Image: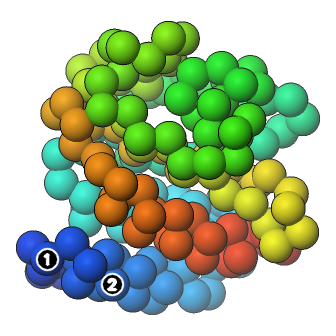
């Protein structure tokens, strides 16, 4: 299905409702996890303003490995518990970092990044699948409302990809 540009509402709850609908539409027939996450990163990148890197790190053993993304070339592996993404995985909780320069051990995907949101993806059985990582050149781009909405998106994505190859 070809992508059709979408007018996203300014109201945050309405924005995220439309975003969830767009993700469902563009992931409905994904044959593999990689294809689903590739389309997800494209939809998220198109929808979320003021972001310079959006993508996924996938759990492989004790590391996160780079998956589909939109943005500049990125760090290819992140050890468990390192950086914002590693903290999200270790703590099993979304990380809202308003100033990445104040985050000890921050790993930059793009040197222009000033804030970050890292959301873990877990299968229904509790298995860690990966991290949805969003970076912005703006300080404090993400807030608790973004985190709550992206948690719901991550849960949807995890349920879609958990059993795909």
The answer to which of marks 1 and 2 sits earlier in the sequence is 1
Neighbor class of circle 1 (other Cα within 10 Å; few <14, some 14-19, many 20+) is few
> Where's residue 98, x and y in %?
30, 32
Position of 140 compared to 130: left or right? left
Tag 1 near tag 2, CB within 8 Å: no
Disc 1 element: loop
What is the CA distance from the residue labelled 1 to the residue labelled 2?
10 Å
Image quarter (top left, top right, bottom left or bottom right) of the C terminus: bottom right
- Please tell me in which quadrant of the rendered image residue 36 appears: bottom right
Neighbor class of circle 2 (other Cα within 10 Å; few <14, some 14-19, many 20+) is some
Picture disc at residue 11: 1
Position of 63 compared to 5: left or right? right
Q: Count the marks: how many?
A: 2
> Where's residue 156, x and y in %?
60, 76
Give the residue at mark 2. Answer: 17
Picture disc at residue 74: none
- Residue 77 to residue 158: above or below: above
> Where's residue 88, x and y in %?
62, 39
Residue at the extreme front: 144
Disc 2 element: helix
- Residue 81 to residue 71: above or below: above
The answer to whether residue 22 is seen in the rendering is: no
- Residue 111 to residue 33: above or below: above
Could you tell me which residue is drawn at 70 percent across and 39 percent down? 91
Could you tell me which residue is drawn at 68 percent across and 77 percent down? 160
The answer to whether residue 119 is seen in the rendering is: yes
């Amino acid at each position: 299905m070809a992508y059709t540009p979408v007018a996203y509402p300014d109201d945050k709850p309405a924005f995220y409702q439309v975003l969830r609908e767009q993700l469902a539409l563009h992931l409905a027939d994904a044959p593999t996890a990689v294809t689903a996450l590739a389309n997800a990163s494209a939809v998220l990148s198109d929808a979320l303003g003021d972001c310079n890197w959006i993508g996924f790190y996938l759990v492989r053993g004790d590391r996160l490995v780079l998956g589909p993304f939109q943005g500049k070339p990125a760090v290819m592996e992140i050890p468990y518990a390192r950086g914002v993404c590693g903290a999200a995985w270790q703590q099993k909780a979304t990380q809202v970092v308003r100033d990445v320069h104040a985050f000890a051990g921050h790993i930059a995907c793009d040197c222009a990044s000033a804030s970050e949101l890292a959301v873990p993806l877990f299968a229904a059985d509790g298995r860690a699948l990966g991290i949805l990582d969003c970076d912005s050149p703006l300080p404090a781009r993400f807030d608790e409302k973004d985190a709550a909405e992206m948690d719901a998106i991550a849960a949807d994505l995890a349920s879609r990809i958990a059993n795909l190859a």
